[in-house]
Structures are given as C-alpha cells and as structure tokens.
Amino acid sequence: MTAAEWGLLIFLSLLWGGSFFFNAVAVTSLPPLTIVLSRCLIGAATLILVLRLMGKPLPFNAGSLPVFFGMGLVNNVVPQVLIVWAQQSVPSGLASILNATTPFFAVLCLHGLTTTDRATPAKWLGVVVGFIGVAVLLGLDQRMAAGSVWPQIALLGASFSYGLSAWWGKKVAALGVDPIAAAAGQLSAASLLLAPLAYGIDNPLALPLPTASVLFAVLGLALLSTALAYIVYFRILATAGPTSLSLVTLIIPVSAILLGILFLGETFAPRHALGMAIIASGLLIMDGRLMVWWQGRR
C-alpha cells in the first residue's frame, strides 16, 4: 500500500476503534437498543444526504430491499446490539479484541455456506490459533461457572454475525449499486428493524435527557464510526483491495485500548495482551503475510 493508503487505514482503525469508546460513554445513561437505533438512523440520513449531494440515485427498490434488510440484520442490528449490551460490563479495549475475531468466523461461514470460498490450510491454522487466543482472553477458570463470561460470549456472537455478513455481503455486491448507496440501504433497513424494538422495549421518548457527553458519543458513533467510516472503508477497498483492508482488524484494538486507558480509566491485564498477540498471529497466518515473511527469511 502507498503512504496515503496506510494513512487511511490507520484513520479507519481510529474511527472503528473509537466506536467502542463512544459505546462505553453512551451506555452510562442510554439503553442498548436506543444507542444502536440512533447510530443507524443518523448514519443512514447522513449517507443519503451524501448521495444526494453527489447526484447519485438512492438504492431502494423491490429487488434490493430484502437484501438490505438481511444485511442490516446481520451487519448492524444483531452485532451492534450485542456489543453495546456487553459493554455495560466489559471494558472497551477487551471488547475490541474480541471483535477482532470476526475474520475467523468469516472463514467458517464462507467455507460452510459457499462452494467458491473454501478455507485453505493456512486459514484453518489461523482460525485454530485465533480461538486459542480467545480461550486465553476469556480465562478458562472459575469465572466461566460464575456467569461473568456471558458478556464476552455475546461479543463473540457479534463477531459471528459480522462473519455471517461476509457471506450475505455477496448478495449486496450482486445488486451492483454504489458502495455508499449500499451502506445507506443497509443502515436504513437496520433502522426500520430497530425502531419498533427500541420504542417497545426502551421507550426512548420517556428517557431523561442525556448529558452533553452522551449526546456527543451518540453523534460520534453515527457520524464518525458509521457514516465517515463507510466512506473511508470503500475508498480503501477500491484502491488497496480487501486483503490489505483486512489489516484494519489488527489495528482497531490498539486505538480502542488507548482511548479506554486515557479517558475511561480502564486497565489492561497481561492475559489480555497475550490473547491479543495470539489473535493477531492467527490473523497474520490467515492473511498470508506471515508465511511469506517466514519463507523470505529462509
């Protein structure tokens, strides 16, 4: 990648790493469904406005709506609600590390649900190494029996849903619409799915007015970690390709951990650092760069 592409990749990691920080601030006074609905709704409105300013058509039609509803479910509603719910008790840094397991679940989903994206031996090895890192993170001890591990299991469920979206995303790509339009479509569908749930369970109109910091956190989620992040994401995808783009999963935890330590007073246990290192090794094995580097050394 060029220096400009590396800069965009690091910027994207800050935007997505920042989402865990924004979540941690927002959950102090808002329930999960309300947070995710606000993120999707404001993000969708922003991207639709961008499309209008660019003079590009909106993607809504009878053929695209079912696809967008599926993508909105597996790429927004399910994973983001699980993440926000879990972050009521899990530090943002640890949440970001567990979210970095998404590529492992993507390999499993694509291998099991398609005939064209079969896992190679290197990818299987990467998956095994990655889940060893997850076991280290969870700490397979008495805490498992105590039930405090369930929020972390929810984070792994979110990663599985994101991995499933790698398979469903092929249906979105087959629509042939502009990438920003696709993002606007799935966020709009996610908003429609979330609205009745949020109003039925959270009743957001009856909630007390949030503090300024919480409102800014919600706006940060919607405008920075969603709308702007999608624009940067598709820019990198077009110029550097999906393989280079996948490196962002290695960098996101770094920004999330630093933000959590600097602004939220979070701590980072040695076991978490070891688990992150093992997961990163699994991702590099899957990516192929580590194997190329090792062969070059030989």
Image (tube, rainbow, N blue to C red):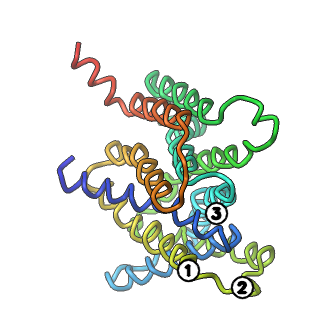
Amino acid found under the numbered disc labelled 2: Pro
Residue 293 vertical placement versus 93 (above, below) = above
The residue singled out by tag 2 in the image is: 208
Residue 145 vertical placement versus 98 (above, below) = above
The disc at residue 77 is 3
Whether residue 295 is visible: yes
The disc at residue 215 is 1
Q: CA distance from mark 3 to mark 2?
A: 24 Å
Q: Nearer the viewer, mark 3 or mark 2?
A: 2
N-terminal of the pair, mark 1 or mark 2, is 2
The answer to whether 268 appears left or right of 201 in the picture is: left
Asked whether the beta carbons under mark 1 and mark 2 sit within 8 Å of each other, the answer is: no
Quadrant hosting residue 269: top right
Residue, x 64% and y 63% (percent of image)?
77
Query: Could you classify mark 2 by the number of other residues whose Cα lies within 10 Å: few (under 14), some (14-19), or many (20 or more)?
Result: few
Query: Could you classify mark 1 by the number of other residues whose Cα lies within 10 Å: few (under 14), some (14-19), or many (20 or more)?
Result: some
Residue, x 22% and y 19% (percent of image)?
296
In this orientation, which residue lies closer to the viewer: 57 or 196?
196
